[in-house]
Amino acid sequence: MSASVRSVPSHATDEEMLEILDRDGAVIIEDLLAADVLEKFNAELDSIFAEEVGIERQFVSETIAGFFSDKVAHVAGIAGKSALFVDHVLCHRRYMSICDRVLLPACADYQLNIAHVMERLPGCEAQFIHRDGWVWKRLPREIGEVQLASVVALVDFTADNGATLVVPGSHRWEEGRYPEAHEAVAAEMKAGSAIVYIGQTFHGGGANVTSDVRRRGMHVSYCAGWLRTEENNALSTPPEVAKRMSTRAQELLGFGIHDDLAVGGGYLGTVELTAPYLVTP
Ligand SMILES: O=C(O)CCC(=O)C(=O)O
Ligand SMILES: [Fe+2]
């Protein structure tokens, strides 16, 4: 097992990334977001956090409240709130090319699963180490990869401020094996970089108990177009906002259809028997 998470520069080829992703289940892509985008996005997020301060969260259960802890500040449904996210992250060339390679074997098209900013506040303990793919626990693993996930560092991620912990190689572990604490490695990286991992890789938010930094990271995950998504993107994106987006952005947010007729399957997601695009594609 690797003792660290491997990083590649932003100009690495898809093949270089995919080789590491396949072997370790995770890879850090440096400088995924350009410095000017990062700065503008963080400024926009500062305003959104300020607007949403005091929101009483009604998590779906006590278990989920505990999973996130009360020491994490959230902005959920980023696609509906940030044009910068839609323009610079949602359809990012690198996400699209990795998703094409990792997810298209199992679907006709993929979609956004969730886009959610999390600040791990000072005093926050480490998150329960988990597989994001467990949200579809009933799906046989033999089906292949149905999820490509990531955490984008919006501030520098360090081992002591809550950098995502990843267990390299764990995507291949048999059902029932759970990581020991020493098997998890902190994905230390500069702001603008992202740790990209597949749905079966064990990981979790790290502890932020000795720093005074609000560890701001964004969970961005894609999944097969025929799955139910974690965030209900077509509802959390107001129609008047979605209308102004490109056709591709709308498809990724659930305003397209999943059309598997080419492999003898059917289609999913229609309104009045057609794709519910909010602009004429
Ligand atoms: O914030 C992080 O570093 C990871 C969060 C995570 O894994 C999750 O919410 O599923
Ligand atoms: Fe996770």
Image (cartoon, rainbow, N blue to C red):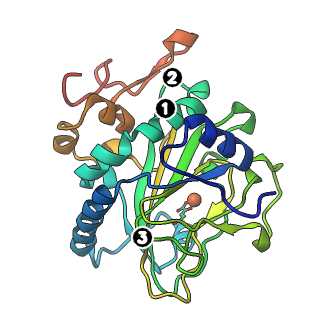
| Mark sitting earlier along the chain (2/1) | 2
Label 2 Cα neighbours within 10 Å, binned few <14 / some 14-19 / many ≥20:
some
* Gap between marks 2 and 1 measured at Cα: 7 Å
Horizontal relation, residue 100 to residue 112: left or right: right
Q: Which residue lies under the disc numbered 2?
A: 108
Instruction: Give the vertical position of 252 relative to 89 (above or below).
Output: above
Q: Nearer the viewer, residue 109 or 70?
A: 109
Residue 39, percent from left and from top: 28, 64
Percent coordinates x, y for residue 124 in the rendering: 53, 82
- Which comes sooner in the sequence, label 1 or label 3? 3
Establish if 262 lies above or below 199. Answer: above
Q: Is residue 133 left or right of residue 239?
A: right
Label 1's element?
loop
Q: Is residue 182 left or right of residue 154?
A: right
Give the amino acid type for the residue marked by disc 3 in the picture.
Val
Ligand 2's quadrant: bottom right
Contact flag, marks 2 and 1 (Cβ < 8 Å): yes
Is residue 224 among the parts visible in the rendering? no
Q: Please give the name of the residue rendered at 39% of the width and 25% of the height, measured from the top-left corner.
A: 257
Q: Position of residue 213 (x, y in %)?
A: 43, 82
Q: Quadrant of residue 142?
A: top right
Q: Earlier in the sequence, mark 3 or mark 2?
A: 2
Q: Which residue is mark 3?
A: 155
Nearest to viewer (mark 3 / mark 2): 3
* Image quarter hosting the C terminus: top left
